[in-house]
Image (cartoon, rainbow, N blue to C red):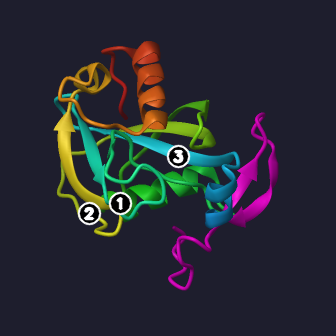
Amino acid sequence: MPSNPELQPASEKVIIVDESNRVLGALPRSQMREEKLCHRATYVFVFNSKGQLYVQERTLSKDIYPGYFEPATGGVVAEGESYDVAAVRELAEELGIENTPLESLFYFYFHNDDCSVWGRVYSCQYEGELRLQEEEVAGVIMESPEDILSNRFNRRYTPDSLVALERLMNLYGDSEISA
């Protein structure tokens, strides 16, 4: 959500794009969700020094995939924002992580019956304390990418983040991913 406290999440204007990631305009988040319009979002994979990811448990009040686990921090790109600005904002809002360099890795397109999104994937390494955004993050667990992708612990993960993580691991494997 943009830093403007007067904006409520449902009325927040988000960038709408076509299937080629060309900007078509901006509409309220609620309309984007209701009409399942293609939009932009960021996905920041936050690793610790052991190669584990900070995996968020989404609150039950989320407008999509409530209660699911999310291996990437991020969210929709708001009107007037770039992917880079949105990634930094979401990381600070959701986990309280600031002043941590992000490595931009790739773009990807995701589409299912619930949503359609052009995502930009980033990574970083972090070892400090977290300040969770109570409205969006119910808790955080640490998991390896391999355990997430094999669903070793039988969790419900957000499908778009799983696609991004699978591509990340296919591209980089066990090599040094984070900045």
- Binning the other alpha carbons within 10 Å of mark 2 as few (below 14), some (14 to 19) or many (20 upward) gives some
Q: Residue at x 31, y 37 (%)?
A: 156
Which residue occupies the foreground of this view, 68 or 83?
A: 68
- As displayed, is residue 2 above or below residue 145? below
Name the residue furthest bottom. 6
Mark 1 and mark 2 residues within 8 Å of each other at the beta carbon: yes
Label 3 sits on what residue type?
Thr
| Image coords of residue 88 (percent x, y) | 47, 55
Q: Residues in magenta?
A: 1-28
| Image coords of residue 166 (percent x, y) | 42, 21
In terms of sequence position, does the residue under pointer 2 or pointer 3 come before the other? 3
The residue pinned by badge 1 equals 94
Q: Residue at x 27, y 50 (%)?
A: 57
Q: Secondary structure at mark 3?
A: strand
- Splitting the image into 4 quarters, where does residue 93 fall? bottom left
Q: In this image, 165 relative to 121: left or right? A: left
Q: Secondary structure at mark 2?
A: loop
The residue pinned by badge 2 equals 132
Label 2 sits on what residue type?
Leu
Q: Secondary structure at mark 1?
A: helix
Please tell me how many numbered marks the rendered image carries: 3
- Binning the other alpha carbons within 10 Å of mark 1 as few (below 14), some (14 to 19) or many (20 upward) gives many
Q: Residue at x 33, y 39 (%)?
A: 71
The residue pinned by badge 3 equals 42
The C terminus appears in which quarter of the rendering?
top left
**Majority secondary structure of magenta residues:** loop
